[in-house]
Image (cartoon, helix red, strand yellow):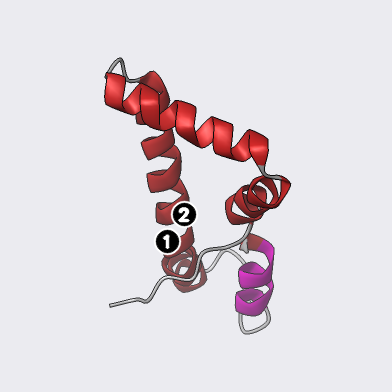
Amino acid sequence: GDIACLIDLLSEASDPGEAALLAAYARARKPDMMARYLGTNTLDRITGSRSWMAKSLQSFGMQALNASASLRKAAMLAGSTPVKLPLS
């Protein structure tokens, strides 16, 4: 996550405000931040939509989460674990 990445980068830098260090941090964190942004944005669009299909999808998802403790745990873990995306 953020802290582990920052610790790794700071261990190799002499100045914590160095432009190269800050740029490296931004590059390293971008995949995780973009994945979280896209996931949050998608959920926001679904819950804010007036479409019957989006409402049905939302209802199905909430019922599935309500019915399964393991699914709830997986969803919480997915929301709090850094995402590893291939950089290409």
| Looking at the image, residue 78 lies above or below residue 12 | above
> In this orientation, which residue lies closer to the viewer: 31 or 7?
31
Determine the image quadrant of residue 68: top right
Identify the residue shown where x is 42% and y is 63%.
31
> In this orientation, which residue lies closer to the viewer: 21 or 37?
37
Which image quarter holds the C terminus? Answer: bottom left
Identify the residue shown where x is 65% and y is 75%.
10
> In this orientation, which residue lies closer to the viewer: 19 or 55?
55
Q: Which amino acid type is marked by label 1?
A: Lys
Q: Neighbour class for label 1 at 10 Å: few (<14), some, many (≥20)?
A: some
Whether 74 is among the magenta residues is no
Q: Which residues are magenta?
A: 3-10
Are the two marked residues, 2 and 1, in contact with CB atoms closer than 8 angstroms? yes
Left or right: where does residue 3 sit relative to residue 61? right
Which image quarter holds the N terminus? Answer: bottom right
| Looking at the image, residue 85 lies above or below residue 58 | below
Residue that protrudes farthest toward the bottom in the picture: 12
Q: Which amino acid type is marked by label 2?
A: Met
Identify the residue shown where x is 49% and y is 71%.
84
Instruction: Determine which residue is flagged by label 2.
Output: 33
Residue that protrudes farthest toward the front in the picture: 67
In the image, which disc is placed on residue 30?
1
- Disc 1 is placed on an element classified as helix
